[in-house]
Amino acid sequence: MKHVIALDVGGTGMKAALVAADGSLLHRARRATGRERGPEAVVEDILGFATELRAHGARHLGQEAAAAGVAVPGIVDEERGVAAYAANLGWRDVPLRDLLAERLGVPVALGHDVRTGGLAEGRIGAGKGADRFFFVPLGTGIAGAIGIDGRVETGAHGFAGEIGHIVVRPGGLVCPCGQRGCLERFASASAVSQAWAEACGDPDADAADCAKAVESGDARARAVWQEAVDALADGLVTALTLLDPRTLIIGGGLAEAGETLFAPLREAVRRRVTFQKLPSIVPAALGDTAGCLGAGLLAWDLLNTSTTFRR
């Protein structure tokens, strides 16, 4: 069966799949990145994992993969196929596309993890059918993917969609990027976790605990939650003013709170818009498979086949 290799590389673990042309996952696997052994070991683990996936396809599907797609975090030069920088993995200027192509002997596409997940959500997930969408996962940080007619915009230098570094609270908390008051310092899952841990006095409390406390009516939790929702709404309205998307797709850990997040967020965005058209604000649909599915799409697109899946 004709298939491609899809790899989604995270800060601590890798998710992988062999993906058919119709989007079905023929084989799935996970592996640690091995980042504690250094950036060179991470690269070798990626290459080794991809080699194992190629061998699995040959043994169980009757042929080796026709191409591969890989999504990585950090700063990615997709045109050159270079993983330019990733703080969590410790690498700089890794020519990952060429290294994988040499190891596998097939064409390889390299993409940014959020943009790749956004590609999947836009084509086959929550944004399917929308000509313009904006995908925003709320995790350790906040990034975004700008979707236009079935593709995701990278920008002139690979930084398109970095909504997490829109300043929403001027003079506020210092961000690792060097600015003060960035959106991700107030509305990411890690920011909510930190704020709730301080408010409730439990250093182990996290954003999921805060959401549960909101649902139970805890006033301190509601204050923390509303601060995050207001900051997020400010950032999203800036984005929709610039981009005019038809659909806003919210994913990541914070979105797992469901309507505890979406009900106040939709209202907060509605209150802020004036001349702008209010987009649909919906939860992501693909969960932690988005990265693998998106990497599969990159690989199939690379093959330029009419059978690229768009279920």
Image: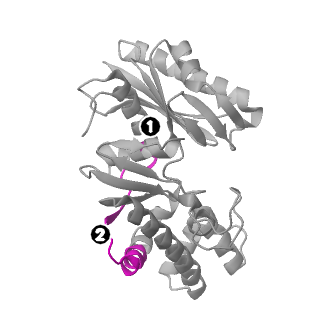
Q: Is residue 184 left or right of residue 260?
A: right
Under mark 2, the amino acid is: Lys
Image: 242 above or below 268: above
Label 1 belongs to which residue?
Answer: 292
Q: Taking 295 as reference, is 191 above or below it? A: below
Which structural element holds mark 1?
helix
Residue at 34% across / 62% down in the picture? 282
The image position of residue 88, as x and y in percent, is 68, 44
Point 50% across, 77% down: residue: 230
Q: Name the residue under label 2.
A: 277
**Residue 24: x, y in percent?**
31, 33
Q: What stretch is highlighted in magenta?
A: 263-290
Crowding near the residue tagged with mark 1, few <14, some 14–19, many ≥20 C-alpha atoms within 10 Å: many
Q: Is residue 231 magenta?
A: no
The x, y position of residue 247, in whole percent, is 32, 59
Tag 1 or tag 2, which sits nearer the N-term?
2
Q: Nearer the viewer, mark 2 or mark 1?
A: 2
Residue at image location 57% in from the left, 37% down from the top:
76
Q: Could you say which disc has been placed on residue 90 in the image?
A: none
